[in-house]
Image (tube, rainbow, N blue to C red):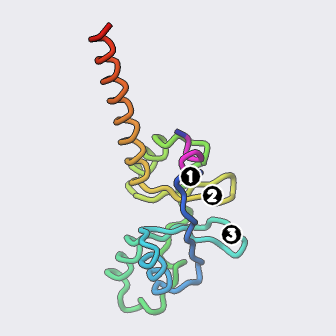
Amino acid sequence: MKVSQFLNTNQPRIITCRRADTLQAAASLLYTNRIGAMPVVDSTGKLVGILSERDIVSAISQRASELMKLRVRDIMASPPVTCSEDADMQDAMQLMMSHKFRHLPIVNGDKLVGMLSIRDCLAMELRDKELEANVLRDRVIATRFS
């Protein structure tokens, strides 16, 4: 399945933040929306980074004394690794696994079109495996009665 097909059927609205946002504001967005990461966009909506819970925890552990002064731009991952909406879900999952992160911004050219999580990819893979098992089971049953 293509990433675009998945996003068309499963994508909630995209929660984003800005580079100048405080860490408290960004953490509140993550918490209230029950998400683990979010894209960072500029004033034109262009993707410029990604901020994750892990980035915030790292900032707390390493820069606690300056925590109240830190902004999203100070700790975000930039430039973000992205994936095209034309990619296969399997390719997106491989990209996340090879870079060891759980959230992936999806783009169409320069435009942010969605976010994909490793959970999304695993759910798709599980669904595909269940479908494959059902087809194989049906073939065995059909073979027995022919």
Q: Nearer the viewer, mark 2 or mark 3?
A: 2
17 vs 8: above or below: below
Mark 3 or 1 closer to N-term?
1
Q: Which numbered marker is on residue 7?
A: 1
Identified at 48% across, 91% down, the residue is: 69
| Quadrant assignment, res 112 | bottom right
**What residue is rendered at 69% in x and 57% in y?**
110
Estimate the x, y position of residue 145 in percent, counting from the top left.
29, 10
135 on left or right of 74: left
Magenta-tinted stretch: 2-6
Cα gap from disc 3 to disc 1, whole angstroms: 19 Å
The disc label shown at residue 113, or none: 2
Residue type, mark 3 in image:
Gly
Could you give the CA–CA distance between mark 2 and mark 1, rounded to whole angstroms?
8 Å
Magenta stretch: helix, strand or loop mostly: helix
- The answer to whether residue 105 is above or below residue 91 is below
